[in-house]
Amino acid sequence: QLQASGGGSVQAGEALRLTCTVSGLRINTMASISWYRQAPGKQRELVARSSIFDGADYADSVKGRFTIRRDTPMNAVYLQMNRLKFEDTAVYYCYTPELWGQGTQVTVSS
């Protein structure tokens, strides 16, 4: 099971850290774990992915601002989001193949 938390309402330019807490699986056995987001009226899109083979990769829109990191002792995955923009407003989900977590809302006001 994946459970996302840490969302909230912030001003543009501020930061948030999302946490994906994993239960029933060990993250060090997951080949990949990702963060997706879905804004109102838009398709769900990949934001960041952590692969044990290839490292991390990011959507162009968040490169240099967001960082995905695995925390093996805590069995969690974080998404550090810095310099947030209005267009980052969305529901954020964590995902590993065939398993979605529930979302957490991020609202950025300009």
Image (tube, rainbow, N blue to C red):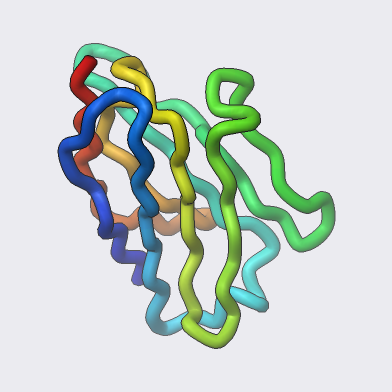
Does residue 35 sit above or below 19 in this rendering?
Answer: above
Q: Position of residue 68 (x, y in %)?
A: 57, 51
Q: Relative to 27, is 45 on the left or the right?
A: left
Q: Position of residue 37 (x, y in %)?
A: 37, 33
Does residue 74 sit above or below 7 in this rendering?
Answer: below
Q: Position of residue 56 (x, y in %)?
A: 71, 47
Residue at 51 percent across and 32 percent down: it is 46
| Quadrant assignment for the N terminus | bottom left
| Count of marks placed on residues | 0
| Quadrant assignment for the C terminus | top left
Q: Nearer the viewer, residue 24 or 90?
A: 90
Q: Position of residue 30 (x, y in %)?
A: 63, 68
Does residue 27 sit above or below 11 in this rendering?
Answer: below
Q: Relative to 17, is 10 on the left or the right?
A: left
Q: Which image quadrant for residue 4?
A: bottom left
Q: Nearer the viewer, residue 71 or 37?
A: 71
Q: Relative to 106, is 58 on the left or the right?
A: right
Q: Relative to 98, is 42 on the left or the right?
A: left
Residue at 46 percent across and 38 percent down: it is 82
Residue at the far right in the pictured view = 53
Residue at 36 percent across and 66 percent down: it is 2
Q: Nearer the viewer, residue 52 or 71?
A: 71
